[in-house]
Image: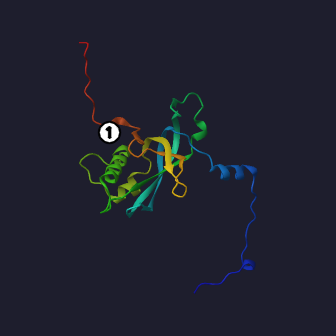
Amino acid sequence: MAENIGWDSVEYETEEITETDVKEIDEGGERIPIGRYLCRVIESSLKQINFNAYSCVGCRLKFEIEQALEIEGRPVTGDEGEQYEGKHIFDDVAFKAPQEKDGMAKRRKYVALRLGIIRPGGTLRKDMWRDNVIGKKVILQLEENLYTDKKTGEEKVGRPQVGFFSGYHYADKSNQVAEEEVWNDI
């Protein structure tokens, strides 16, 4: 049976709200800019994903930035990208659902291949998203996030997001098929 609690029966530790806290809240926190980042998967958790047409289960991947490679279209030089090292990027991957469109299946397979949790001819399983993905390195590409506000109809810019089909690049190309070199000048 649930116990009734009142304000007098609860201890609450006081909290200080700093000007920095207010600024981060008002500005939506620190934003990682558009660019390319070498990242490592540090966590994978189940998530309910709700699309307009259907809902499904998927996973939320949590990446830790190890190195900034490109920021705002320019290669990173010196210590320019160090402030982003250790920061986190999140991306959701929808699992197979009967109502899904071909694009969702293609994206799931694209992400799995780029992360190296599966090879061509393999079978993608739930445990791969839970276990095999942890520690995998990938280069993530954050792109501009343009959207239309549903209430106002106004076009807005949100936090940069991982590109849907352009956001994952191999960090380690050793598992790819070697390309045959062509020597036209011989």
Residue 185 falls in image quadrant? top left
Using residue 117 as the reference point, say whether residue 32 is left or right of it.
right
Residue 182's place in the image compared with 95, above or below, is above
Q: Quadrant of the C terminus?
A: top left
Task: Report the label total.
Answer: 1
The residue wearing badge 1 is 175
Residue found at the very far top of the displayed protein: 186
Q: Which residue is drawn at 51% across and 57% down?
A: 150
Residue found at the very far bottom of the displayed protein: 1
Q: Where is residue 65 in the image (x, y as percent from the top left)?
A: 52, 43
Using residue 123 as the reference point, say whether residue 108 is left or right of it.
right
Using residue 37 as the reference point, say whether residue 8 is left or right of it.
right
Residue 79 falls in image quadrant? top right
Q: Residue at x 27, y 54 (%)?
A: 123
Q: Where is residue 110 in the image (x, y as percent from the top left)?
A: 34, 46
Kind of residue at badge 1: Asn
Residue 182's place in the image compared with 96, above or below, is above
Residue 73's place in the image compared with 39, above or below, is above
Q: Nearer the viewer, residue 50 or 10?
A: 50
SS at badge 1: helix
Q: Where is residue 80 in the image (x, y as percent from the top left)?
A: 59, 32
* Colour pattern of the rendering: rainbow
Q: Which of 101 and 97 is in front in this view?
A: 101
Q: Nearer the viewer, residue 27 or 115?
A: 27
Q: Which residue is drawn at 32% across and 39% down?
A: 175
Answer few, some or many: residues within 10 Å of disc 1's Cα (few below 14, many 20 plus, some between 14 and 19).
Answer: few
Q: Residue at x 35, y 59 (%)?
A: 126
Residue 15's place in the image compared with 117, above or below, is below
Q: Quadrant of the N terminus?
A: bottom right
Q: Where is residue 38 in the image (x, y as percent from the top left)?
A: 48, 39
